[in-house]
Image (cartoon, coloured by chain):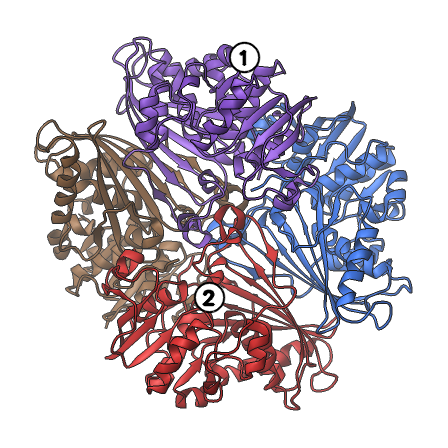
Chain colours: A brown, B purple, C blue, D red
Amino acid sequence: MIKVGIINVTGYAGEELARILCSHPEAKVVSATGRSAAGKRLPEVFPHLWQLDLPVEEEVGDVDFAFSALPHAASAEAVAPLVRGGLPVVDISADFRLGDAAEYERWYGAPHPAPELLGEAVYGLTELNRPAIGEARLVANPGCYPTGGLLALAPVAKAGLVERDVIIDAKSGVSGAGRGLGLTYHYAEANESVSAYGLGGHRHLPEMVQELSRLWPEGGSPRVTFVPHLIPMTRGILTTCYAPLADEGLAWGEKAGTEVLGLYQDFYRDEPFVRVVTEPPQTKHTWGSNVCLVHPTVDTRTGRLVVVSCIDNLVKGAAGQAIQNMNLMLGFPEAAGLDLPAVYP
Amino acid sequence: MIKVGIINVTGYAGEELARILCSHPEAKVVSATGRSAAGKRLPEVFPHLWQLDLPVEEEVGDVDFAFSALPHAASAEAVAPLVRGGLPVVDISADFRLGDAAEYERWYGAPHPAPELLGEAVYGLTELNRPAIGEARLVANPGCYPTGGLLALAPVAKAGLVERDVIIDAKSGVSGAGRGLGLTYHYAEANESVSAYGLGGHRHLPEMVQELSRLWPEGGSPRVTFVPHLIPMTRGILTTCYAPLADEGLAWGEKAGTEVLGLYQDFYRDEPFVRVVTEPPQTKHTWGSNVCLVHPTVDTRTGRLVVVSCIDNLVKGAAGQAIQNMNLMLGFPEAAGLDLPAVYP
Amino acid sequence: MIKVGIINVTGYAGEELARILCSHPEAKVVSATGRSAAGKRLPEVFPHLWQLDLPVEEEVGDVDFAFSALPHAASAEAVAPLVRGGLPVVDISADFRLGDAAEYERWYGAPHPAPELLGEAVYGLTELNRPAIGEARLVANPGCYPTGGLLALAPVAKAGLVERDVIIDAKSGVSGAGRGLGLTYHYAEANESVSAYGLGGHRHLPEMVQELSRLWPEGGSPRVTFVPHLIPMTRGILTTCYAPLADEGLAWGEKAGTEVLGLYQDFYRDEPFVRVVTEPPQTKHTWGSNVCLVHPTVDTRTGRLVVVSCIDNLVKGAAGQAIQNMNLMLGFPEAAGLDLPAVYP
Amino acid sequence: MIKVGIINVTGYAGEELARILCSHPEAKVVSATGRSAAGKRLPEVFPHLWQLDLPVEEEVGDVDFAFSALPHAASAEAVAPLVRGGLPVVDISADFRLGDAAEYERWYGAPHPAPELLGEAVYGLTELNRPAIGEARLVANPGCYPTGGLLALAPVAKAGLVERDVIIDAKSGVSGAGRGLGLTYHYAEANESVSAYGLGGHRHLPEMVQELSRLWPEGGSPRVTFVPHLIPMTRGILTTCYAPLADEGLAWGEKAGTEVLGLYQDFYRDEPFVRVVTEPPQTKHTWGSNVCLVHPTVDTRTGRLVVVSCIDNLVKGAAGQAIQNMNLMLGFPEAAGLDLPAVYP
């Protein structure tokens, strides 16, 4: 068994790593850190993890692999010495997602703590970047929103079948905001309410622009409008993506939908965690699982592609994909520990 | 006091009419019909309406004004003889919203039951159609989604500041689907889940296209993509609208947002039920009230207008707007019975 | 119009006072205080109260009547000088509910800030204490749990038909915990979960014991076990009360239920806000309204009374009852401003 | 691998059996029946079970073991021939829980379809009946409410430390009512509402009385009042049990709580799925898992035991316990397939 450390186990992403790894056949959590809870046992913080009776420590112990679930900036600071020391790491924070340190500073408001590692960090959207992830020692786990958006758009973008002009309207459960308190996430405020946020520019936008730019055959940055919404549920992101069909490439009219569906089915045919579905999906069907459901359609009245994707923001959108990446980095079967069905209803 | 009848009080729109009219200073519900519940007292069906101890009847009694909350087709059949007999009516169903009987048949799958009344029916989006509503004897109350979308887009469309190319991504609470049972609306299925629906074309689409067509100064049908989503909450619709800014008319860059905001504030300055807000609104702040919150922004990176609106789907999206229309038709103050704040939290 | 002040408008009880008073025919909020929000306008804190465009102040202004919605201890300190100055006050905090300063100190952990006022404070469970409230200048508004429990038990206790041995199992929505942040009330923690709390003794217990003691004809303190539960909803308390039937007084068997029902119907016959119902009630049927639904039953297998009551914790359990008490104190019709039906669904 | 059949896979209990068995190391679902869905593939009914691509059949195929998740009466009819043919079966319906056919007829309104099997059916509350289950060929899986109530009360009842006079106040998520439609379970009706039901006598009452009667050392039927409540969440039951402490057996005062806690810890020390906890538990900490959390306390003011337990109604309250019983019947490790932590948050 590989010895795994979780840096900052006390947030939802850290907790979810611990939960999922409880049933991993090749990896075992042996060390978990957390600033506020240091000194407690893990089950005191998370009673449902009573089988994982570790101390919450200040510093990660002797491990073969580490996940960081720290907030940005703190994560790069904690991760950099580990990576330099040769430890393979998946960083769930945003710190190594943007390849350009200036862009990082623009969006995160402070200089990057370890810019010299940006060059070797690999963006960990597993399905789009598998070979590089397999060779990486530092993987930047994607944001939850980019995961849903990129998997929804990749097949048509790579095929050049839509214009580089994209609207991403995402609906997220409240756990995406983390375990830190705030009036917006107070039960009586968030329940029975929907709201948009980040209209001036959400930090996941540059990440999506960067990764979408790599997809179109002719290259070049797409115009991306991204609006996230907060939804009164705990887990799940549903992403609705809109893009004009390119003038060439698809049949006209009703056939376009069939062609697009076929394209997606081919693109994701062998993927263990992406399923192309022919009925509108529900986030509920991904609850607790690493699957991403993708439903491509064509609005023939307007010539627009409309793709809907669903993920569990804490699994495929965070801890699950991180473990999927670890599996690749360590040569385990990609689905190891991740092959459970969603918990429904 | 005006004597009011509610045809089909047993659904959510009918119930909501009854609830709101309990505190109307000029109108009193004296007759309420309902097929399944005929023979019961109204408080047996809706215990919270114990003050309104009427029988649920088969046919509407002697009234001065009627609301129909029947499903489409049935509504036109019930309403037509009343209108012909001179009774002023607000029809909450879709039957008199589309002006073109052929378009109606295309979307509703059967010939219109009373096409001869289409010419005189007035589309009841109060803020956009006030004079005609005041003169009408038959008002077609707008659908819940068109209400949110049209109020969000009207100021810029009328000013010609956006192109006729619109995406409307709407998020609705489950009460919008009515009181009829269905697996999709079963608690354990709808809770903790979000889904898109109507991707092939929702019946509120032609209504939005028809009404949007009237707004642009140069006329002409806009291209509209409309995707509704089901959200795990009881009441509320948040609508996010996207449209490219027209090449002319607005300042460049950051100023565009300020100009657009000013335009909206001017447009809705004297409206009792539309409030332009400078922070992203929450549906919770409209819960149980007739208000529509509108939040216009400009995505300066892409040159797109992004407007968010919030309504309570059962009030401004149905019963409240119907009463607002009745007030105009009968010469009452427009806000009579409708001036209560939202119930928060 | 009477000029009303709300001390600490920024919590849920304070907000709810402001919301309900918007439609009060005789009283108008002219001053509102709040420590954290002082300097803002009220609609900046609560956008749904945009019609009530007052400043949030440090100190209450010139008013004819004041409500305090401060936390305990702070409330007595703020209220005492006002009462001494002759201003009629309803205090929503716990400070004047317990008549015994020593008991107060035992449960609230500090000496009472104004023990000299305890003697004249009247416990404001309106239905049980109407004459004294009408003469009071300081009314202690009951806790939300005692309101639900006392209205459920009063008729049989006063009739001596149950033993002084009571179990009160209450289920409350999360708004009962207030607007202050805490992990327990964080959306992702409270959603999809039920828990009991206060098992070692909740502060509403001595209040219930004190008031129940006054009910039985023979006097004497009842044995009361009270267990509150947190339920994933925003508003509402459902209280289930259990007590052994006294050996004498009721018929045996099935008739006992009918007798008990009749007793409750007689007891509450003329009450504007208590309704005895013959089907199990739902908290939803009290949402946003001042009504209390009471459903008395007899478990003939065990000889136990089982009574279920429902209230909206923020209305009859807080702000609504406070206004009901103000109405009595000022000689207004008791239901003034409070006669709206619940908002359903 | 053992070949398993699920009779009536299309309800929530049947679906949950299928979901959990996806990760069972020794058993594999090879046949699944369902009347309404016969002819479809299982993933058409439950998209999240796409890995289990079986046809939904009319009749169960060639299997080594069967679960029945049919409604009562239909279940006994389907199960009886299988049991007579020698197939080991766990019946999740109520049909074989009551040992007395007359009692069954009294509560279920029709004669028992297979009374001759009542004698050999074993009540499958695993922790209390392990040896008999291991030898059984027909196990009656307990109701969800009895599971929560019996595990909460067994230690003190067996020790004779409480009187035979018990109140069980249970709070259940809506999935407990199954997948069949009903207005009570319609999203807009069940959301933001709590209600009691079954006040006249719920069918789980005789089951609890029967099993509790076996626990007290002196025997004899306890007086049991049982009131279930419907809570706006999908999964979970929290059960609050109240019973007077017996006059002898426990220390007085504060020590009583410590003694009772020790008793529970001893009683459940070696149980893989029952955890005695010292803080009030949340149903969330059992979500999707087979664990039962038990929190015993003493109300020293009244001399009452108050025990709170939490389970996931679909797992320990239905499918999980059924698999736990299968494991015993087939000689597998008891926790096989069931050792995953709860999914939190």
Is A141 positioned to the left or the right of B51 in the image?
left
Residue at image location 57% in from the left, 67% down from the top: D239
Residue at image location 66% in from the left, 26% down from the top: B24
Mark seen at residue D312 = 2
Q: A191 or A137: which is nearer to us?
A: A191
Reply above or below: A313 against B35.
Answer: below
Would you say residue C70 is visible in this rendering? no
Q: D171 or C69: which is nearer to us?
A: D171
Residue at image location 29% in from the left, 37% down from the top: B199
Is B251 positioned to the left or the right of B4 in the image?
left
Image mark 2: chain: D
Image mark 1: chain: B
Mark 2–mark 1 Cα distance, whole angstroms, equals 57 Å
Reply above or below: D271 against B299.
Answer: below
Please name the amino acid that badge 2 sits on: Asp
Reply above or below: D327 against A17.
Answer: below
Reply above or below: D34 against D146.
Answer: above
Query: Which SS class for mark 1?
Result: helix
Indicate the position of residue B132 as horizontal and vertical percent values.
Answer: 49, 11
Indicate the position of residue C67 as horizontal and vertical percent values.
Answer: 75, 36
Mark seen at residue B134 = 1
Indicate the position of residue B165 as horizontal and vertical percent values.
Answer: 27, 21
